[in-house]
Amino acid sequence: MFLSPLLLLTLATQPLTAADDAPIQVFLLAGQSNMEGQAVVDLVHEQHYNGGRGTLLRLLDDPAMAKRMGHLQDQDGSWATRDDVQVRYRTGNNVLKSGPLSIGYAVYDDLHHFGPELQIGHRLGDANTAPVLLIKTCWGGKSLHVDFRPPSAGGETGPYYTQMVKEYREALAAIETEFPDLAGRATELRGFFWFQGWNDIYTDGAVEAYEQNLAHLIDDLRQEFDAPLLPVVIGETGNAGSLPLRHAQAAVAERPQYRGTVSFVSTAQFMRRPVDSPNKGHGHHWFGNAESYFGIGDVLGEEMVRLIAGGAMKGSEEHPGPIATRGTTATARWAGQLFAGYDPARAFETIEFADGWYREPGNEGFEATLDHLLERLKKSGFGTDDRLQLEVIETPMRSPAWTPKSASLVMKQTDQPDQTLLRFHNSRAPHRTMLPVHAPSCDVEGPLCFDLDQLKKGDVFVTDRSIGRAMRDARSKGAAAVLSSQLADFTVDPSGGDRHLDAIHYSSVRSGDFPVAMISPRVHQTLREHPEARVALKAVVQFDERPLRTVVATIVGRKIPDEVVALAAHVQEPGAVDNASGVGGQMEGVRSLVMALGKKEIEWPARSISFIWGDEMTMSRIFLDHSKRKTIAAFSADMIGASQGMTGAIALLERSPDPGAMRVLPPDSHTPWGSGRVRESDLHPSGVSIIARLAMQDVAAASNGWVIGEHPWEGGSDHDVFLGRGVPAILMWHFTDFAYHTSLDRLSHVDPRMVRRMSVALMASALAVASPQPDDLQRYQQAIDEERTLRIAAADQAQDSESKKMWQEWCAGAQQWLTTLCNESSPEKNQR
């Protein structure tokens, strides 16, 4: 959902409480050792603290970090204190720490560490004029399953649940003696922070029970403290490799009963490299990195402020759009039902399977993924029920299917052991994109060269240029191989870290025999630091002759079966977000829809709906060429599952070509992908963008919030193929994803909650076109009126009479399209 810039400013600057005698705003912080606090402040011992790397003191030497963290230090170099925020914490050694917010409220009996409470306190203090009290109740090495086990979970209540409640009450009773300046004030429990999970990974049955146990914990604390709507912020155990645990934490916040009061916050984006941290061997403690704990506290505190303010999830100021009137018609007729029946865990199973392969047209991973989909589609009844048709279309491939098997890049130096810089030996390995598509097998070695003008025969050319141009120029000079660290301009870690330096671009080259590999900027820098070295590049790839398969699953319409709505999710490309998330998201959307149809929870669609998987764009052309049905609208599911915290991307609607794609006026803007070329003759008014916009906002209303935006047409996915055939089409995707088309696009970047929202929005959009109702038209008309008002006002502001005219004509055409649709006639200008 969207927030206007004015509303965002209001929420950011308006205090949550303002009265001089307002109650003390109390917040309970609980968890295990990472809530205790392991961030190192100023210890610099070379052996024990890695020379101070990643400590708060060292970070503040960096101007960029000082801008973010400068409020933690006074001008004289001492650590700042904050009297409007007080902290109370009794450590596991029974040492009581209490006083104004500053450094030192950590598990150790010193001032050399801090925890998330530091920046949580600053966020809450900035949002309140009433005093704030943080009560920390946390102990290292404790599980939710046993130690914090809440009473309603059954079995023996955990001793640290009891201790948590006891210390909270003890803290309130001690206010007059420990915080005399607050004596006489009432108290109000305003929020609960939960940052825990590591020990449950290693406790039998704990991960499987974590979601339910955490729900019990929230319910029991709300009852214990007589606070039925107590805001709760759950911090992800982002330093743990257990995705099931992290998904369970997120799933709690998805429960309908917690809508607007419980929120999950991603933290994995704040993990920093051990070499850049003080405690290199302590991954369970975020390597003691001060930036990690600061970032975690910052997002936890920010989210609590949002929950208390009752604000919507922060929308995109870059990609806002019209806010559609809520209602119960159009896409709202399906959004809630579909959302309830969609199983994100099932979707993730397919996503995980697909992510295990380097998927290219016709290769081993592509074929394995299609077989996986076919098996699941058949289990859902496709191919055995006349109303559920399943087709595998085989067409010739232009070139043999390419499968990378293994590769390595080794640096060789005199009197030094060989150093493997990059390597993969199976399709799951992190460095698998080091071989661009169509790269040949090779076994070459040569000296390094970084300057094309100085390149000699037999050298290995290292560059950050486009791989295609670099290959052409280097080959003409007799180079042995080319290594490129090319990345897109937007490939920059949005968390403030340097994850992008390890990104290896996913690229492709023309088929041939010239050795080539992609490398990360960090590897590039390593090579530059050793210009005298030689490098050896080895690669093994496999070519197979086989036909290209396209899978089409069709729910045959009950009333107008010869007209079809198409949904496309491409299989090729090796990323988890791009596009394993689209593959798995669409598969679960199909399964859950068929289940709902079978139970008659949703009426069978009037028009047919086809779901397509295959080679991007090619599959849509194949579908249109082979289908005997008239395609009246299409929706592309591409990159639908990005975690905003991990990638920086939000859910976006890319509209079909409209006047905004020709003349961009506020509030529109393009993504870093860039604008496509649009002529006035390309503008064919339709209602698919209106329908998709309503669907996304209806899903936001049906779920516990959703950060969404939209932008004019840019192109680059399957929707373009349908548009080229005169079929109205849109794209739903996530951007700007800094890991797009890089080796970093793996499972940890996929958020099953986003997969669920996007998939349901796509399904609701398709159903709205397949089964329109006359009473949908009123809501569509309201949406068009909102669009017209917004666009004409922008054109008037810009004194752009041409845009004004185009938008007036567009809105009139969209209204006619939707009127025709809702009368269950085929919209004009549709072609198969």
Image: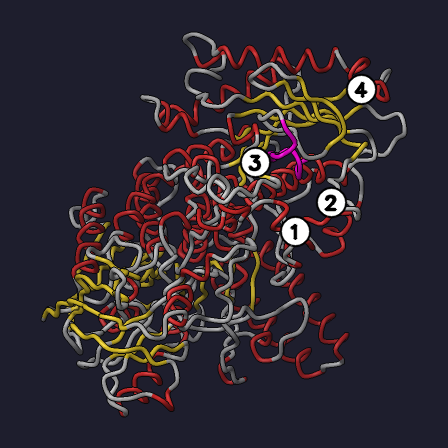
Q: Is residue 273 magenta?
A: no
The numbered disc on residue 60 is: 1
Q: Nearer the viewer, mark 3 or mark 2?
A: 2
Of mark 4 and mark 2, the one earlier in the sequence is: 2
Q: Is residue 782 visible?
A: no
What residue do we see at 22% from left, 70% from top? 537
The amino acid on which the numbered mark 3 sits, given as a three-letter code, is Ser
The amino acid on which the numbered mark 1 sits, given as a three-letter code, is Leu
Q: Nearer the viewer, mark 3 or mark 4?
A: 4
The numbered disc on residue 179 is: 4
The numbered disc on residue 263 is: 3
Q: How far is mark 3 from mark 4, CA to CA?
A: 30 Å
**Horizontal placement of 589 versus 93: left or right?**
left
The amino acid on which the numbered mark 4 sits, given as a three-letter code, is Phe
Q: Position of residue 503 (x, y in %)?
A: 40, 62
Q: Which residues are magenta?
A: 110-120
Q: Nearer the viewer, mark 4 or mark 1?
A: 1
Q: Nearer the viewer, residue 302 or 160?
A: 160
Circle 2: is it few (<14), some (14-19), or many (20+) Cα within 10 Å? some
